[in-house]
Amino acid sequence: MSAQPDLLAVAKLPPFLMEPLQARFTVHTSLDSAPLDRIRGIAGSGESKVPADLIAKLPALEIVSIMGVGYDGVDVAAAKARGVMVTHTPDVLNDDVADLAIALALNIARRIPQAERYLRQGRWASEGPVPLATKLSGARMGIVGMGRIGQAIAERARAFGMHIAYTARSAKPDLPYTFHDQVTALAAASDFLVIITPGGAATRKLIDAKVLAALGPKGYLVNVARGSVVDEAALIDALQKGTIAGAALDVFENEPNVPEALRTLDNAVLVPHIGSATRATRQAMADLARHNLELHFAGQQPKTPVPECR
Ligand code: NAP
């Protein structure tokens, strides 16, 4: 075994994570050339895939450190069965993702990108004012997932005088918001439906044609969770037919590929998975992901194991 533990990077890690890792570990970036029997740790991002067959190829694997809060690409059951620790980076990104959710809701309601395009195209001068938009302050926000980020979104929405309701696996009696145990009922009671659950099998296509129909022709969908949570084909159909008023999306089913049908819709605001993409937050995530690895290889419990590994 080399003096420094061998790590496999399964994502293109940013330099502010890669460089400090390279100072402490021997980091391999290709599975093909990595010494499989010596790899003791995996470093990845929230979008990384760490399936059971990869874990099976790495007999010395001890830890998977994800720089991101979502770890739906990691087969945690397979890792646990082998005694492999899985860590992620919760909390440090709550503010950024919540800020973006509110920004997206404002952008789709007030049609800010559309209005900006209108101005740049010279249409203000030639055609006059843009059509009127939708008021966000005081409207009803339904939040699907009332965890760390969902609560940060709700706090911001309260400052806009919004009426807040939510769904989650269980009610949160300590929170001053209305709980619906069915997402369809929540959608029917919302002007803005904001999705912020984990991805993975349990939430796949949770937002389907029925939920979109319940949201209705005046309702807006905001997705900052994972593309897998929304039935994208049903969403495109709902946007084309006016079943819902609009959608603002940070995440997509098959990133970085976004269907042409979605990209050409005027009632959609689309951004390329930028929920946590500020310098400050990505640095904090990188520091926590590195710290988890360092603690583990110093024989200590990592700071933020995923719930299944606590
Ligand atoms: P969290 O604290 O674990 O909260 C998750 C919430 O979702 C909880 O309220 C949970 O319910 C609820 N939930 C889980 N499974 C559900 C289901 N099947 N049906 C309905 N609700 C369900 O996680 P978080 O830190 O807020 O992060 C949430 C997710 O946001 C991450 O997993 C990630 O996928 C996504 N995310 C996206 C970005 C981005 O860049 N766009 C950035 C960060 C995170 P209970 O409270 O009842 O358990």
Image (tube, grey):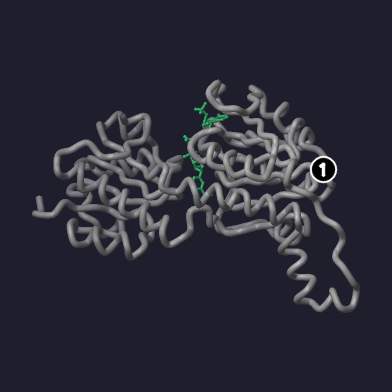
Q: Where is residue 259 drawn, in percent x and y?
A: 67, 56
Instruction: Name the foreground residue: 15 vs 204.
Output: 15
Q: Is mark 1 within 8 Å of ligand 1?
A: no
Instruction: Answer with left or right where residue 18 lies relative to residue 70.
Output: left
Q: Residue furthest right?
A: 127
Identify which residue is drawn at 34% across, 54% down.
Answer: 286
Position of 196 with respect to 180 (left or right) is left
Given the image, on which type of amino acid does mark 1 rest? Answer: Lys
Image position of 23 with respect to 245: above or below: below
- Residue located at (23% from left, 42% from top): 61
Q: Considering depth in this image, is 280 or 253 the residue closer to the camera?
A: 280
**In front: 195, or 231?**
195
Q: Position of residue 270 (x, y in %)?
A: 65, 57
- Quadrant in the picture for residue 71: top left
Residue 50 coordinates in the image, percent (x, y)? 37, 44
Left or right of 86? Residue 247 is right
Is 15 rendered above or below residue 149?
below
- The quarter of the image holding the C terminus is top left
Q: Residue at x 33, y 40 (%)?
A: 87
- Point 58% across, 52% down: residue: 100
Q: Is residue 194 above or below residue 276?
A: above
Picture mark count: 1
Residue 139 in view: yes
Residue labelled with disc 1:
218
Residue 168: name its quadrant. top right
Q: Is residue 77 left or right of residue 114?
A: left
For the residue labelled by badge 1, is the local secondary structure a helix, a strand or a loop?
A: loop
Residue 309, x across and y down, in percent: 32, 31
Q: Is residue 170 visible?
A: no
Category of crowding for the residue at label 1, using alpha-carbon neighbours closer than 10 angstroms: few (below 14), some (14–19), many (at least 20): some
